[in-house]
Amino acid sequence: MYLAYAFPVTAPAPSAEHWQSLFTLYVIAAVIVAGVVFVLFFFFLVKYRRRPGVAEPADAPKVGVMVDRGNPALAAILTALLVALFFGLTLNTFALNAYLQQPPNDPNAVHIDVIGFQWGWRFVYSNGKDVIGEMRVPQHVTVILNITSQDVFHSFGIPDFKIKRDALPGRVNVAWFVADANIGSVYKIRCYELCGTGHALMTADLLVLDPAAFTTWLKGA
């Protein structure tokens, strides 16, 4: 008998660590840039503030008048650094996504075609077994998902495993994970793309089985 969503052990996909590292890198870069901007903001706010009885600095900017154009070389250097930073982060994001689209070469992996439709999920196994609304996987075995859609844009996600891939008609996106979770654990699968009036109900269950039990189920009727 399966557990009824009673606090299953969270088992993030191996890709989650890579995405978390990239996210942390983005946060660090954003904090550094924001820190520099705020420091300069308050520096100039204090330097050029109006003070009773004190003449304005000679280099104080006048409304509507460009008194000092600043240092063009410094501005160019800062712009180049920002462009390089964000270009590098963007390039790293696309490279990581391409890398994670390549599943491990595991001869024992379980391959499942995931097909989104309004409003549900169909799971087709390599032997042709076709199930709607429920995906069963073996414990501690690589599971490779080929995700697509038969109608409109959907987005396949397993929040506890930190997996999310677009399900697009005419295109197959790949995701993979290893279900290192307790046997009998149940996880929710959801759609994360607004796809019509039944979007909120477009869910499915992921069940983690003992490998022997999974093989018996897969070969069954």
Image (cartoon, rainbow, N blue to C red):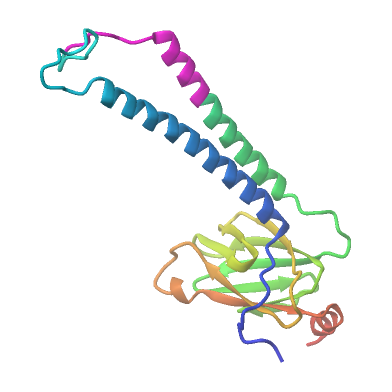
> Which segment is the magenta one?
65-82
Q: Which residue is drawn at the image coordinates 72% and 92% (left, top)?
A: 1
Tell me where residue 94 appears, x and y as whole percent: 62, 40
In the rendered structure, the answer to whether residue 185 lies left or right of residue 90 reads right
Q: Which residue is drawn at the image coordinates 23% and 20% (left, top)?
A: 48
In the rendered structure, the answer to whether residue 77 lies left or right of residue 12 reads left
| Quadrant hosting residue 60 | top left
Check the image and name the residue furthest to the left.
53
| Quadrant hosting residue 15 | bottom right
Q: Which of 132 and 203 lies nearest the eye of the viewer?
A: 203
What is the magenta segment's predominant secondary structure?
Answer: helix
Task: Identify whether 202 is placed above or below 19.
Answer: below
Check the image and name the residue furthest to the bottom.
1
Question: Which image quarter holds the C terminus?
Answer: bottom right
Q: Which residue is drawn at the image coordinates 68% and 58% (left, top)?
A: 175
Q: Which of 137 and 71 lies nearest the eye of the viewer?
A: 71
Task: Identify whether 58 is placed above or below 34.
Answer: above
| Quadrant hosting residue 181 | bottom right
Tell me where residue 102 appears, x and y as whole percent: 75, 49
The total of numbered circles placed on residues is 0
Tell me where residue 70 appears, x and y as whole percent: 34, 10
Q: Which residue is drawn at the image coordinates 83% and 64% (left, top)?
A: 109
Task: Identify whether 108 is placed above or below 6.
Answer: above
Check the image and name the residue furthest to the front.
53
Tell me where residue 113 appears, x and y as whole percent: 69, 66
Q: Which of 215 and 151 lies nearest the eye of the viewer?
A: 215
Q: Which of 10 and 110 lies nearest the eye of the viewer?
A: 10
Task: Identify whether 185 is placed above or below 92.
Answer: below
Judge whether residue 78 is colored magenta.
yes
Judge whether residue 103 is colored magenta.
no
